[in-house]
Image: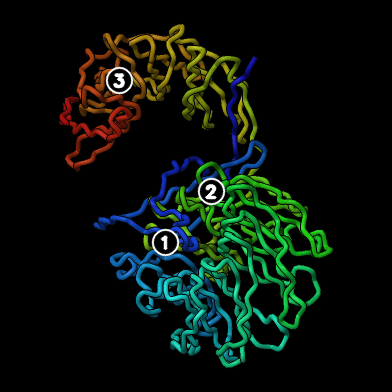
Amino acid sequence: MSTESLEMILGNGTGNPDSSNTPEDVPHEIETVSKSTNAPYYIIITASILLTITVMSIAIVIVCLNSPKSHYTCQSNFRAITDSSSLLHDSYPQSIATGDFNHDDALDIVVVNSGTNSMGIFLNYGNGTFGSQIILLTGDPSTPLAVSLSDLNNDTHLDMAVANYDTHAVAIFFGLGNGSFSKQGVFSTGISRPVSLAIADLNNDGRSDLVVVNNGTHDISIFFGNGDGTFNNLVRYSTGYDSFPYFVAISDLNDDENQDIVVANYGTHNIGIFLGDGRGDFASQKTYSTGLYSYPCSITIHDFNNDGKLDIAVANSGKDNIGVFFSCGNDTFGSQIIYPTSPGTGPKSISAGDFDRDGHLDIVVANYRTDNIGILIGSDNGNFSSFVMHSTGIDSAPFSLTVGDFNNDSQVDVAIANYGANAIVVLIGYVMVQAEIPTTYSAGSGAIPYQIITGDVNNDTYLDLVVANSGAGSIGVFLGNGDGSFQEQVYYPSVSQADIRGIALADLDHDQQLDVVLTHFNDESLGILYGNGNGSFMHVVTYSVGSPASPRCLTVNDFNNDHHPDIIYTDQITGNIGVLLGYGNRTFGPVAKYLLGSQSQLIGIDAGDFNHDGNLDVAVADYGIGNIGVFLGSGTGAFTL
């Protein structure tokens, strides 16, 4: 026998995780295409998008998805960085990186604009706000896809290397130390389709070297630096037939003080590791499977279990999960441990940071298909628990992300390149604070609690809970103790099998006591339980609303300006709203009905003065048509569409 219950989560003043995000398919896919029957396959980014850009505002929805035992509140502050050229010229930002470009101790942002063949620089003012985009052209038709930062010419200023997909080349931009850059040259990677790159000293000569991922030739190229921003001695290492390598990361995986290379092989569904000898040579690739059809596309390397060894985390876009490979300490890694990111998310980019400030690394991914980022909460032993999601905006299609402290508050922030919205979103001070374990209060077997409201029903100045028990045909009253705890439920029956859906509290008869108003979904009626002022209620009084009818939700207010509360409810099956004008003496006038549409199925309802005429209007949610309906009030209790 199942038992329905309520959960109480005590807040800490930072916000409530109370909304959800509906996944939407995004019309940008990574796919393999054949140029001819004998030609190699290339992974390309299809960007056939019809954008109609009008004046728009983006509603950011905060989403927290919690496991049954871990509950988090979320605090965030969005700052959307956009530029007119990005919005109007289909920039399609695809890669993002951070660094201090002007030596002001504030992290700046660079984004790769694949659609406009340019780089965008956003200089940080030091308080989490950024200047307008400064554009650096990469040439037409270069189609830049990735950027990496380092001091390539040993002048103490950060420089940029950019992978140009369509011109099969890497472009070098020298930083001038003041936030500006000069283009120094372009060198060919062959007919290779470069899609990712990384910079490190691979041969221990104190100079920056470059690793380029060649998606078209299924290999990586290594260019050894001369210390002046030029490169030579190209060396290639195969990543395997049809591997379509997609991303590269560099780190010392085996603690031998030599840099190693890790590649995400999108086509063969694995990661490939090339162990370096410190002289610029690398062992043949050793692969670790990420699962059939996983399509790994991003990697981050950190010590996730605090054992002093570097581990590898990968975003598996095809299987909607994060894979973690823990180091065994002997140049090998264990099998992948999988953490789901929710169906349909399509994680595209991955990074790590301590977002909940517990001293343990968490993992963050950009969920391309569901327009959000997801944070996987880490622990001291490498286990991960809750996966918390946060919206990046409607149709944003987040493609790449990076982490850093953008406002110098010692808290990790996240910057995201939104491919679909042609914009950058920066999450400043994104904090998750663990709340108390929720206290559960039983609503009884078969109760099916449908809606809950709060009010002081016993006049002790403490908030109480009143619950509509749809399955039991009753209301449940939980009297508050004033300390966040509640007494056990007291039942008050309504109409048997009425299927209570809507509930409201109001003083209907001017006796200074709160009364309860209910909708009886299966009984074609409303119910009122008049309050006694001590937390108890009288027997239900029913008011027929005619037939056919299925009253769903309701609102109580003075709609005819006579200082008596009136009731308006939505009727799900007829598409009407019903208005009962109150006389203040426990009686009501006949039901007046107003039709929204014959195909309408009205669910939610709320009231407000929408046209500033001093009269209350009503807005309803039309589930059947997918619209919002607005009825304008006349101030006499009558309404017009």
User: Residue 404 placed where, x, y %?
Assistant: 57, 68
> Which residue is disc 1 drawn over?
35
User: Residue 8 placed where, x, y %?
Assistant: 59, 33
What colouring style does the render use?
rainbow
The nearer-to-camera label among 2 and 3 is 2
The local secondary structure at tag 3 comes to strand
Q: Is 115 situated above or below 11?
A: below
Of the image marks 1 and 2, the number of the one nearer the N terminus:
1
Which residue occupies the foreground of this view, 169 or 486? 169
Identify the residue at horizontal 19%, vertical 31% (top origin).
Answer: 633
Q: Is 172 situated above or below 575?
A: below
Query: Which three-letter amino acid code belongs to the residue tagged 2?
Result: Met
Q: Could you give the CA–CA distance between mark 2 and mark 3, rounded to whole angstroms?
A: 34 Å
The local secondary structure at tag 2 comes to strand
Judge whether residue 120 can be spotted in this image. Answer: no
Of the image marks 1 and 3, the number of the one nearer the N terminus:
1
Q: Residues within 10 Å of mark 2 (few under 14, many from 20)?
A: many
The nearer-to-camera label among 1 and 2 is 1
Is 146 placed left or right of 50 in the picture? Answer: right
Is 185 placed left or right of 604 in the picture? Answer: right
Say which mark, if any, is on residue 389: 2
User: Residue 200 placed where, x, y %?
Assistant: 65, 79
The local secondary structure at tag 1 comes to loop
Say which mark, if any, is on residue 571: 3
Identify the residue at horizontal 30%, vertical 69% (top origin).
Answer: 84
